Structures are given as structure tokens and as C-alpha cells.
Image (cartoon, grey):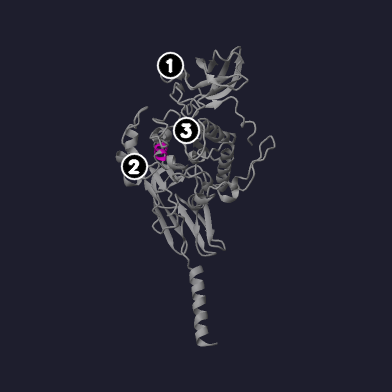
């Protein structure tokens, strides 16, 4: 053989074996120093290596071994563990050895959505100028000192594997500045009740619609209503389907989680969406749960805040567009282990798309998680929620769930933002009186009432609450979608 050809062949063989046989173990960005692992579940640890390379993962007295597949991918699952404040090391061995330090075991949640979820702690000064309710009890931006709350800020351009393994931080000092305020306060309040380490992953992008958060192929279907009507294919909406899923969600899979928090919808509300959004949200929930192989994973979302969408110059929206969107969000409650919080009372101006009461949003989400995900059923997590109505003479008797220790008026005045209509569908302002766990609604102009609504306007901030101070959830008894959604 020609000496030059022999040299080239030798070099080719050497390059092949060094790139495949001696490839180093690599970990995804989400696995790193300072992370929190989910308690009471099998914990996924994964990465890449050379094909057929033997890998071992040692942590907390257990060692799991595996062999990388033909493409170099490998994964193991650690056995379920109890919560632990002990700062332990994890050792991953292949051709090389990686040691991850300062790891805790506790509760891990993913929070995602658009700007109101991304809304960072650096905007703390806006919290201090909030008009309603209590201010945050302390300046967490400058005084936070709990090393048992850990945060991971998912940045779409920086999710590639990193040899430094430094994606996670303690929620103290500089790292907290850019982190989601809702996510941080959720963690802070959850920690106060559970007393276990809390890990929060924030993956949110300002202005994003829901479509970029869903794997594109999952949107390529035509929703069918229960009456047989078929909607247009969801994938035809120009929303950059899968854009953020590919770069921000997929790199997290299958990091073991307790649950997911979602605060998004303003961008889709501006597009005059209702039932179509309901199917997109359903698709997101089901597809993410499928990705994490946990069909029962808790998924909790925030009902977006009052805002004057009808002032939009881009589309002819009415003052009822937002209530209809709330209705679409609530249709996701047809899925098991989903729930929502209302924040109609946390707005100083309906001209502000980003109200500053993020500490209270985080607190309410923590109340919801405590009740539903952690079984603390004595925790009241929601304001009065419409259950049923009954026509009694010339009035409507409305029954509510989530009454807490009783129904009330926030300011002691007559209940506001109730309307009533006869069979003609013409709604008028109504008188509403509390009687036990019911509200009696009537209006002189409507002698034969047929339907009742609460807060059916983008500006509605009703004073109707339970005695725990949580606002009633807006509703209309003449909801056209509830019986059609599937």
C-alpha cells in the first residue's frame, strides 16, 4: 500500500477510536452543583458518553450502573429518597469522572410562561409601590439568606452541556436578581410550610404565546367538540410552534419534578382566542406530562389579571374578551390534577399588563400546592367558585364551593360585578346578598331571571371574597363551552 494512504488510514482509525472509545461523559446543563433532587420519586440522571461505555452514578449510599447505547446516550434512575438538608456529592464515572457538589433532596417545581412569570426579582421596587394589600414582609432581594432554596434560570441560548456544571444557584444575592419573582415566592412560602429543600426551575419568555412551548408536531390536529363540530387545525396558527419547547423545555426532560406552574395567556388573549386556547393548553399539559412520563403530575396555572384588552388598536376586542379567555383557561380543569388561582384583586391599574403583586401570586400558588399536591386539605387555596344556580321566584340562588370559613365582602359594601338576565340575554347590574354559602341575585328589571354572571368584564375587580381574603372566581352560568369541550 502507498505509504501516504497507509498513514491516512492509520490516522482515520485513530480518530475513530479516540472519538468513540474515549469520549468523555457529558451531562445536560440541568444536572449540576447545588441542584435539588426530587424526594419520594425515582430520580433520573442522564447524559452522553462513548457508545457501549460503562457508566456508574453514586449518590447518598446508592450506586446505579448502565451502558451507553449505540448513539452514546445513557440514563439511570436513583431509588426514591427522603428529603435531606445534607450537602452531598454525586459521582458520575465513565472514562472520566464528574463530581457534583452541594446537592440537596426535597421538592422540585418547574415554572413557565411569559412575562408575568419571567417578571424578575430585580423589579422589587414595584412591589413596594403596590397600592393594595400587604407589602412583602421583608426585602427579599437584599435580605434572602435561605441556602436551602435553589434556583435554575433556564436561558434559551445557554442550555448546552457545560463542563463547569454551574446552572443551579442558591436563592441569595446576585443569582436571585434575575429569577422569577412568582417562582421565588412560591418556593419561599412552600419551604415555610414543608421545611424541606425547594428547587425551582424558571423557563419563561416575555411576550411568548403558548404555541412555542408545545412540541410542534403535537399541534398538528383538528380539535373535535362534543357536538361533532371540528375546529381548524391548531398548527395553522402562526405562533412559532415548538420554538421554546425545543430550546428550553426539551433540554430539561426528564429531570424529576414534583409539578409545574404556568402563568401565560396575555399574548393569546390579544388574538381573541377562547376555545382554541383551551385545546392548546390541554395539549401542552398532556404532552409535557407524557414527556416526563407522569400522567398525574400536578399542573397549576394563574388566571391572567384584569387588563383593558379592548383598547388594543391591532384587533377589535370587546370588554368580554378577557372573561371569555378566563373561561377557556378554566376548561383545562377537566384534566385531573390541574387547578388554578384567581388574581382579579391584584391590579392597581387595568392599563398595566404586569401588575406588581408577584409575592401574592406566588403565595396563592403555594396554597394551591399545599392543598392539592401535599394533601393539606385544611389550607384554603381559592376564593368562592361557582358550583350551581337555582331560579327562585324572581331571583337566582347561586351556590359556591371554596367558601373557606365563610363568604364575605372585601370592603363591607354590597357585592359588586354581579349581573343577571332573562331569556333575552340582556344582562343588567344586579343586587347580590350573601346567605350562608349562597348568594341571592336579583334585579327589578328582570322579573323572570335565566342567567347570572360575576365579573364578566375585563375591568372587573369584584369585592366578593371568602373570609380568608381570596377573590371569587369570575363565571357565567350560560357558559357555552363547558358541555362541548373534550
Foreground tag (2 vs 1): 1
State the mark number for residue 122. 2
State the mark number for residue 370. 3
What percent of the width, then of the height, locates residue 301? 50, 36
Closer-to-camera residue (18/62): 18
Disc 2 versus disc 1: distance between alpha carbons?
37 Å
Q: Are marks 3 and 2 in contact (CB under 8 Å)?
A: no
Secondary-structure class at tag 3: helix
Foreground tag (1 vs 3): 1
Disc 3 versus disc 2: distance between alpha carbons?
27 Å
The relative height of residue 226 versus residue 257 in the rendered view (above or below) is above
The relative height of residue 246 versus residue 189 in the rendered view (above or below) is below
State the mark number for residue 424. none
Q: Which residues are magenta?
A: 182-187
Residue under label 1: 413
Question: Which mark is first along the chain, 1 or 2?
Answer: 2
Secondary structure mainly formed by the magenta segment: helix
The relative height of residue 32 versus residue 462 in the rendered view (above or below) is below
Closer-to-camera residue (387/289): 387
Question: Which mark is first along the chain, 2 or 3?
Answer: 2
One can see residue 146 in this view: no
Q: Mark 1 packing: few (<14 Cα in 10 Å), some, or many (20+)? A: few
| Quadrant of the frame with the C terminus | top right
Residue furthest to the bottom in view is: 2
Can residue 185 be found in the magenta stretch? yes
Disc 1 versus disc 3: distance between alpha carbons?
32 Å
Can residue 445 be found in the magenta stretch? no
| Quadrant of the frame with the N terminus | bottom right
Residue furthest to the right in view is: 228
Amino acid at each position: 500500500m502507498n505509504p501516504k494512504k497507509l498513514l491516512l488510514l492509520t490516522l482515520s482509525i485513530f480518530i475513530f477510536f479516540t472519538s468513540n472509545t474515549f469520549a468523555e461523559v457529558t451531562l445536560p446543563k440541568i444536572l449540576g452543583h447545588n441542584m435539588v433532587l426530587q424526594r419520594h420519586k425515582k430520580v433520573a440522571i442522564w447524559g452522553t458518553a462513548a457508545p457501549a461505555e460503562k457508566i456508574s452514578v453514586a449518590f447518598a449510599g446508592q450506586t446505579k450502573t448502565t451502558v451507553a447505547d449505540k448513539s452514546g446516550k445513557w440514563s439511570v434512575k436513583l431509588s426514591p429518597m427522603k428529603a435531606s438538608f445534607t450537602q452531598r456529592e454525586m459521582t458520575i464515572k465513565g472514562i472520566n469522572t464528574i463530581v457534583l457538589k452541594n446537592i440537596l433532596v426535597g421538592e422540585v417545581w418547574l415554572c413557565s410562561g411569559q412575562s408575568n412569570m419571567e417578571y424578575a426579582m430585580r423589579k422589587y421596587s414595584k412591589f413596594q409601590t403596590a397600592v393594595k394589600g400587604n407589602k412583602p414582609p421583608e426585602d427579599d432581594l437584599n435580605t434572602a439568606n435561605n441556602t436551602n432554596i435553589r434556583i435554575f434560570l433556564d436561558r434559551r441560548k445557554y442550555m448546552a452541556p457545560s463542563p463547569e456544571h454551574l446552572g443551579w444557584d442558591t436563592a441569595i444575592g446576585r443569582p436571585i436578581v434575575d429569577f422569577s419573582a412568582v417562582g421565588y415566592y412560591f418556593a419561599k412560602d412552600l419551604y415555610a410550610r414543608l421545611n424541606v429543600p425547594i428547587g425551582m426551575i424558571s423557563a419563561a419568555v416575555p411576550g411568548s404565546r403558548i404555541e412555542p412551548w408545545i412540541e410542534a408536531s403535537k399541534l398538528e390536529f383538528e380539535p373535535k367538540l362534543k357536538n361533532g363540530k371540528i375546529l381548524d387545525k391548531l398548527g395553522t396558527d402562526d405562533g412559532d410552534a415548538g420554538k421554546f419547547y425545543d430550546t428550553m423545555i426539551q433540554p430539561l426532560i426528564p429531570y424529576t419534578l414534583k409539578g409545574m406552574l404556568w402563568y401565560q395567556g396575555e399574548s393569546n388573549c390579544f388574538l381573541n382566542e377562547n376555545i382554541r386556547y383551551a385545546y392548546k393548553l390541554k395539549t401542552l399539559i398532556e404532552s409535557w406530562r407524557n414527556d416526563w412520563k407522569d400522567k398525574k403530575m400536578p399542573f397549576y396555572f394563574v388566571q391572567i389579571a384584569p387588563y383593558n384588552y379592548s383598547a388594543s388598536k391591532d384587533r377589535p376586542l370587546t370588554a368580554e374578551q378577557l372573561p371569555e379567555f378566563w373561561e377557556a383557561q378554566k376548561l383545562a380543569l377537566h384534566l385531573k390534577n390541574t387547578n388554578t388561582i384567581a388574581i382579579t384583586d391584584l391590579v392597581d391599574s387595568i392599563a398595566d399588563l404586569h401588575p406588581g403583586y408577584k409575592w401574592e401570586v406566588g403565595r396563592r400558588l403555594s396554597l394551591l400546592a399545599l392543598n392539592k399536591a401535599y394533601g393539606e386539605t385544611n389550607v384554603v387555596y381559592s376564593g368562592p367558585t361557582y358550583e350551581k344556580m337555582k331560579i327562585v321566584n324572581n331571583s337566582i340562588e347561586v351556590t359556591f364551593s371554596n367558601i373557606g370559613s365563610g363568604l364575605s365582602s372585601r370592603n363591607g359594601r354590597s357585592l359588586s360585578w354581579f349581573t343577571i338576565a332573562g331569556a333575552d340575554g340582556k344582562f343588567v347590574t344586579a343586587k347580590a346578598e350573601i346567605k350562608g354559602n349562597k348568594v341571592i341575585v336579583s334585579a327589578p328589571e328582570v322579573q323572570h331571571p335565566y342567567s347570572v354572571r360575576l365579573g364578566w368584564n375585563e375591568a372587573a375587580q369584584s369585592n366578593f371574597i371568602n373570609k380568608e381574603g381570596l377573590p371569587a372566581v369570575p363565571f357565567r352560568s350560560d357558559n357555552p363551552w363547558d358541555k362541548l369541550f373534550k
